[in-house]
Image: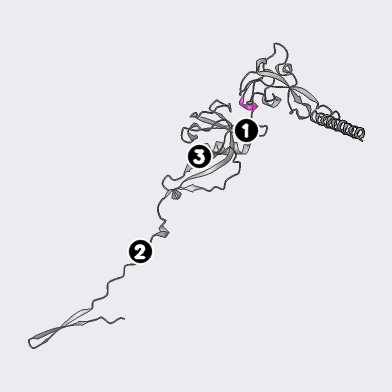
């Protein structure tokens, strides 16, 4: 009996060790992706090594090649640094849209070889660029920067005393440049004399006409607010303060004083008496 007990105990011990080893192998296989999972296909693309801003000329020290999942390569990406730089001795590309370090270099964000960083290269195909003159007041004290969105307002004075009005001409318009600066990396206020906006052809006509008949001003929008607001024309009557005339108590009409009539004096000997006589109503 004792030998049989020892044999069963040994069998149980071997079975336990085998089970532990089997579970461990299964867990290690699952953590490594398992032999049944094929490796994820990858490729190489070019990314920015440093931050790049509008107008920068792209050199080799600005670029690096990294491994990238082949299924998620963005359209317009470059596979090698040589594709970005072109043939040896060729002209450089320039940055059209700012890029952060490790961001893929895309054809839509850089010019062609020997290209220039001009305003026309960053305007959408169906849009136009139009410039309006501003000062430190109607230009929002210089806090409007390239990449911001603004509302354009027009103030007209048909009659300076009674018929001055302000209307919202356009809403949610993108700012392309301030004076001759189009970089969206600027983060400090700059008092400007001119602001260039990206608008449709119809909006460009409106702005051009509005500059001839009135004064234009800008209102800076929140960067997440793209909903058109319900607006109305503001006139001089909207600037009045205090209670409205309707709220004032009415003035009581002035009534004429009652007719006192006339007095009759009667003498009886040496005694005189006065009698008040009222006038009969007609």
Q: Residues within 10 Å of mark 2 (few under 14, many from 20)?
A: few
Q: Residue furthest top?
A: 89
Mark seen at residue 251:
2
Examine the image and state in which quarter residue 31 appears.
top right
User: Any magenta on residue 121?
Assistant: yes
Question: Where residue 188 appears, x then y in whole percent?
Answer: 51, 28
- Are the residues tagged 2 and 3 within 8 Å (C-beta)? no
Numbered disc in front, either 3 or 1: 1
Question: Where residue 226 appears, x then y in whole percent?
Answer: 61, 41
Residue labelled with disc 1: 128
Q: Nearer the viewer, residue 195 or 83?
A: 83
Mark seen at residue 213:
3
In the picture, the quarter occupied by the N terminus is top right
Q: Residue furthest front?
A: 2
Numbered disc in front, either 1 or 2: 2
Disc nearer the start of the sequence (3/1):
1
- The colour scheme used to paint the residues is one colour
Picture residue at 51% right of the left edge, 48% below the top = 233
**Image: magenta residue range:** 118-122
Question: Where residue 84 appears, x then y in whole percent?
Answer: 71, 19
Q: Secondary structure at mark 2?
A: loop
- Are the residues tagged 3 and 1 within 8 Å (C-beta)? no
Examine the image and state in which quarter residue 99 appears.
top right
Q: Nearer the viewer, residue 278 or 243?
A: 243
Picture residue at 23% right of the left edge, 76% below the top = 260
């Amino acid at each position: 009996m004792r030998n049989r007990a020892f044999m069963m105990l040994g069998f149980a011990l071997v079975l336990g060790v085998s089970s532990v080893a089997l579970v461990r192998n299964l867990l290690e296989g699952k953590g490594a992706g398992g032999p049944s999972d094929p490796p994820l296909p990858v490729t190489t693309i070019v990314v920015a090594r440093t931050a790049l801003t509008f107008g920068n000329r792209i050199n080799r020290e600005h670029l690096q090649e990294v491994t990238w999942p082949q299924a998620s390569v963005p359209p317009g990406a470059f596979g090698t640094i040589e594709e970005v730089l072109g043939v040896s001795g060729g002209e450089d590309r320039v940055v059209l849209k700012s890029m952060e370090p490790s961001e893929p270099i895309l054809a839509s964000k850089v010019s062609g070889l020997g290209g220039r960083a001009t305003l026309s290269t960053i305007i959408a195909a169906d849009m136009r660029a139009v410039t309006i003159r501003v000062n430190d007041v109607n230009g929002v004290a210089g806090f409007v920067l390239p990449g911001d969105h603004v509302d354009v307002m027009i103030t007209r004075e048909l009659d300076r005393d009674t018929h001055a009005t302000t209307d919202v001409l356009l809403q949610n318009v993108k700012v392309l440049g301030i004076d001759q600066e189009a970089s969206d990396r600027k983060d400090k206020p700059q008092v400007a004399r001119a602001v260039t906006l990206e608008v449709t052809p119809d909006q460009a006509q409106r702005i051009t006409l509005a500059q001839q008949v009135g004064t234009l001003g800008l209102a800076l929008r929140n960067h997440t607010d793209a909903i058109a607001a319900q607006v109305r024309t503001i006139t001089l009557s909207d600037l009045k303060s205090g209670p409205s005339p309707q709220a004032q108590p009415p003035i009581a009409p002035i009534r004429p004083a009652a007719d006192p009539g006339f007095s009759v004096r009667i003498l009886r000997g040496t005694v005189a008496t006065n009698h008040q006589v009222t006038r009969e109503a007609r």
